[in-house]
Amino acid sequence: MKDDTMTRPAVLILLGPPGAGKGTQARMLEEEFGLVQLSTGDLLRAAVAAGTDAGKQAKAVMEAGGLVSDDIVLAILRDRMADPDTAKGVILDGFPRTAGQAEALDGLLAQSGMKVTSVISMEVDDQAMIARVAGRYTCAGCGEGYHDDFKQPATAGVCDKCGGTAFKRRADDNAETAGARLAAYHAQTAPLIAYYEARGVLQRIDAMAGIDTVASSLSAIVGRLSAQ
Ligand code: AMP
């Protein structure tokens, strides 16, 4: 039987601990391949900022570095997946994070005749992750990511991308909370590597390399998928 996976919109999952570079890389893939980045962390932060019921329930858990309940995360993702732009194909960044979310994702995609195309495990070293997370910040205007040690704007205090001069740091990007987030990753999310490997859709990349090197590896993988 003909495999029609690639005639459907691509559903890519970036798996990896906090600080692996999922968000940075998802934004680059979004631009290059016209896919839509879906970050449950971003959706939850927006819900917290808007003061919705879901946001109120999620806030304390996020500040402590734990995982928000599957019910809340799934409701938020389901709403976003209903937007027409996601029909172009999506890059899931920070989702799924539990076995329950992975199973629910299959059900959600099946409703629109889609399935997970490819899962890329971004492999990194735990200690380096804490340092990466603790130094990062973004442009308040366009969301471009920066880091105290690894990626400063070319002109200090001015965003390379949009020229904005206001920057922000996430409340949970500190060494203590990063440790809790890493522990949650190992306990609940890392088992998904074996889950997707058994389904034959997993690829691993070394995400300890620089941003551009990791971007080239990812671009080659996604480019091959698009050409299939
Ligand atoms: P992130 O931006 O992906 O690092 O997510 C920030 C925080 O949002 C996490 O530490 C969790 O508290 C919460 N979060 C994001 N995505 C999920 C998810 N798929 N499941 C549970 N909690 C999540």
Image (cartoon, rainbow, N blue to C red):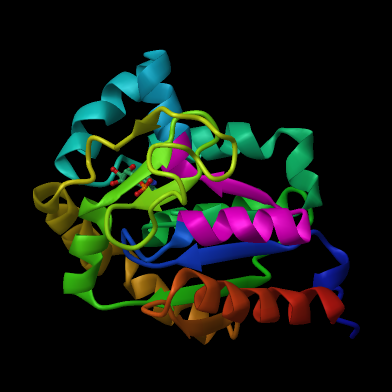
Seen at 25% across and 78% down, the residue is 125
* Most common secondary structure along the magenta stretch: helix
Across and down, in percent, residue 82 comes to 70, 34
Seen at 60% across and 31% down, the residue is 79
Q: Nearer the viewer, residue 213 or 192?
A: 213
Quarter holding residue 34? bottom right
Seen at 50% across and 56% down, the residue is 24
Across and down, in percent, residue 175 comes to 12, 53
Q: Which residues are magenta?
A: 23-42
Does the stretch in magenta take in 75? no
Work out whether residue 39 can be spotted: yes
> Can you name the residue that lies furthest to the left here?
176
Seen at 65% across and 61% down, the residue is 29
Across and down, in percent, residue 180 comes to 14, 54
- Image quarter where the C terminus lies is bottom right
As drawn, is 72 to the left or to the right of 126?
right
- What count of labels does the image hold? 0
Quarter holding residue 70? top left
In this rendering, the answer to whether 25 lies above or below 51 is below
In this rendering, the answer to whether 224 lies above or below 175 is below
In this rendering, the answer to whether 59 lies above or below 98 is above
